């Protein structure tokens, strides 16, 4: 799909056409984003623009379900407040959402590890409740690791470091052998990586980008214990979370290894100048992979 150039002038024109009462607010570009582009709107809002995503599915999910979930979540999340529809000026969907203040973790750091572990555990406890029958089911996430072998193998062959490759594969095979989730389908964020959480004052302060959310196995979010949190805090996270049995932790560790490899691949793509690549994600992924292995 050809990328549409999204500028501040375009955002203002769209607001003037569909939400003129917001058109006078300051507009500032937010770095990052691939499928969708974010723009700050004043101090408290943001405009989320469909960009490279071929369908508006992710935006529609956020519009439908974030207002349902947000009130019970203990960390700030973006909540839709206005809808933008396709027009001659911009033939895609867009949403005005509340702004979640803080710095994305892939550009920041966590220095208060215990606090962050408690915050993440509390957030996921609140999120991981039984989902309604109408909740979305993912077609590319949420499966048991045994059904993700092709994806793991592709990442493994592309970026697994030789010095730890055998250990990475052992963690993955242990996840493949773990029992499947037998509980009810629960709400799952589905894409907890360092660009989708924000930090301030050394700890987690918000969760963003719920476009991948689905109902299913919570292990897909529990992988964040290693992908997001500093070394040595995963055990505290699981103690606080309280709802994960040994099989869930094994699945989560394997999924964390796969997510770490994905971050490393995105870093490699960035170094090669490929579209969507992010050079600074390489070291982030490697550090997460080391945390996975240290806890194995």
Image (cartoon, grey):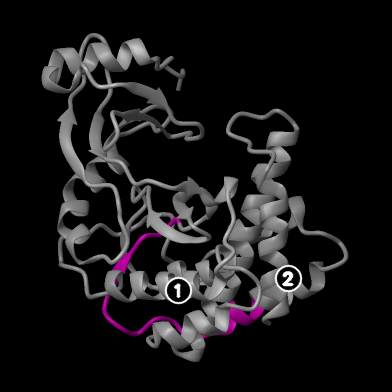
Residue 3 x/y as whole percent: 46, 19
Mark 2 neighbour density, 10 Å: few (under 14) some (14–19) many (20 or more): many
Residue 109 x/y as whole percent: 59, 56
Residue 261 x/y as whole percent: 67, 57
Instruction: Give the mark, 1 or 2, whose residue is nearer the N terminus.
Output: 2
Question: Magenta residues, as a range?
Answer: 173-191
- Most extreme residue toward the front is 201
Secondary structure beneath label 1: helix
Q: Is residue 80 above or below residue 65?
A: above
- Most extreme residue toward the right is 163
Report the residue at 56% width, 71% height from top: 113
Q: Which quadrant of the structure image shows residue 128?
A: bottom left
Q: Report whether residue 244 is seen.
A: no
Q: Report whether residue 214 is seen.
A: yes
Report the residue at 37% width, 51% height from top: 212
Q: Is residue 222 above or below residue 267?
A: below
Q: Which residue is mark 1?
A: 219
Residue 86 x/y as whole percent: 21, 20
Determine whether, in the image, residue 231 is placed left or right of residue 85: right
Q: Which quadrant of the structure image shows residue 70?
A: bottom left
Q: Which mark is residue 70?
A: none
Relative depth, front residue between 229 and 156: 229
Determine whether, in the image, residue 181 is placed left or right of residue 18: right
Quadrant of image for the N terminus: top left
**Separation of disc 1 and disc 2 at Cα?**
18 Å
In reply to whether residue 179 is colored magenta, the answer given is yes
Q: Which residue is mark 2?
A: 168
Report the residue at 37% width, 46% height from top: 101
Look at the numbered discs 1 and 2 and tell me whether their residues touch, using CB distance below 8 Å.
no
Secondary structure beneath label 2: helix
How many numbered badges does the structure rendering display? 2
């Amino acid at each position: 799909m050809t990328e549409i150039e999204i500028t501040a002038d375009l955002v203002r024109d769209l607001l003037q056409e569909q939400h003129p009462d917001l058109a006078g607010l300051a507009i500032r570009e937010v770095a990052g984003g691939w499928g969708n582009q974010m723009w700050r709107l004043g101090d408290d809002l943001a405009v989320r623009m469909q960009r490279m995503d071929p369908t508006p599915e992710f935006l529609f999910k956020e519009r439908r379900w974030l207002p349902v979930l947000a009130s019970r979540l203990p960390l700030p999340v973006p909540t839709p407040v206005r809808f933008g529809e396709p027009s001659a000026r911009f033939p895609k969907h867009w949403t005005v959402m509340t702004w979640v203040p803080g710095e994305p973790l892939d550009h920041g750091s966590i220095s208060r590890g215990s606090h962050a572990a408690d915050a993440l555990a509390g957030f996921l406890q609140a999120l991981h409740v039984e989902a309604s029958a109408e909740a979305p089911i993912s077609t590319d996430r949420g499966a048991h690791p045994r059904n993700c072998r092709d994806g793991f193998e592709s990442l493994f062959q592309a970026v697994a470091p030789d010095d730890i490759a055998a250990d990475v594969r052992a963690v993955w095979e242990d996840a493949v052998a773990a029992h499947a989730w037998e509980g009810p389908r629960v709400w799952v964020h589905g894409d907890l990586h360092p660009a989708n959480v924000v930090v301030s004052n050394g700890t987690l302060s918000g969760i963003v980008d719920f476009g991948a959310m689905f109902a299913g196995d919570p292990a897909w979010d529990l992988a964040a214990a290693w992908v997001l949190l500093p070394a040595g805090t995963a055990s505290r996270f699981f103690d606080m979370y309280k709802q994960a049995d040994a099989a869930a932790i094994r699945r989560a560790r394997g999924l964390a290894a796969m997510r770490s490899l994905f971050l490393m691949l995105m870093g490699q793509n960035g170094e090669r100048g490929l579209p969507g690549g992010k050079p600074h994600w390489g070291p982030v992924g490697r550090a997460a992979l080391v945390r996975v292995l240290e806890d194995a």
